[in-house]
Amino acid sequence: MGKDKDGKASDKSTSTPEVTDQWSGPTATRFENKAYSEYFDPCQDAAKRSIRCLHRNGGERAMCTDFFQAYRDCKEQWQNARKEARRKSSWFGGGLDKRDR
């Protein structure tokens, strides 16, 4: 946990990047236009930051938990966005959702 400007504990570290909507704009375009066999990780930036943190702190995982969480959050949001896009584009999923019936 970091501290805010008043010295109170806060959930966000100031050095930890915010998870943004990375799957819109250029990232989404690159993903849609990639070759079928090409691997593309939209959360690669968060992964690199995690690795850099580990190198900077001598492999001490406890020092990098915020970076790991940012990567996990990014991956989860990306997977949810892809599931939703597939659901909307599928033949059977484009209609009513189970909750809407």
Image (tube, rainbow, N blue to C red):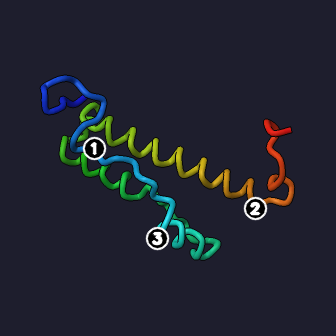
Q: Secondary structure at mark 2?
A: helix
Identify whether 61 is placed above or below 31.
above
Disc 3 residue crowd, few under 14, some 14–19, many 20+, Cα 10 Å: few
Disc 1 residue crowd, few under 14, some 14–19, many 20+, Cα 10 Å: some
Q: Secondary structure at mark 1?
A: loop
Q: Earlier in the sequence, mark 2 or mark 3?
A: 3
Disc number at residue 16? 1
Q: Which residue is mark 3?
A: 26
Please name the amino acid that badge 3 sits on.
Pro
Q: Which residue is mark 2?
A: 89
Q: Label 2 to label 3, Cα distance in Å?
A: 20 Å
Please name the amino acid that badge 2 sits on.
Ser
Q: Residue at x 28, y 31 (%)?
A: 62
Q: Quadrant of residue 15?
A: top left
Q: Residue at x 33, y 42 (%)?
A: 67
Q: Residue at x 41, y 46 (%)?
A: 71
Q: Label 1 to label 3, Cα distance in Å?
A: 22 Å
30 on left or right of 2: right
Q: Label 1 to label 2, Cα distance in Å?
A: 35 Å
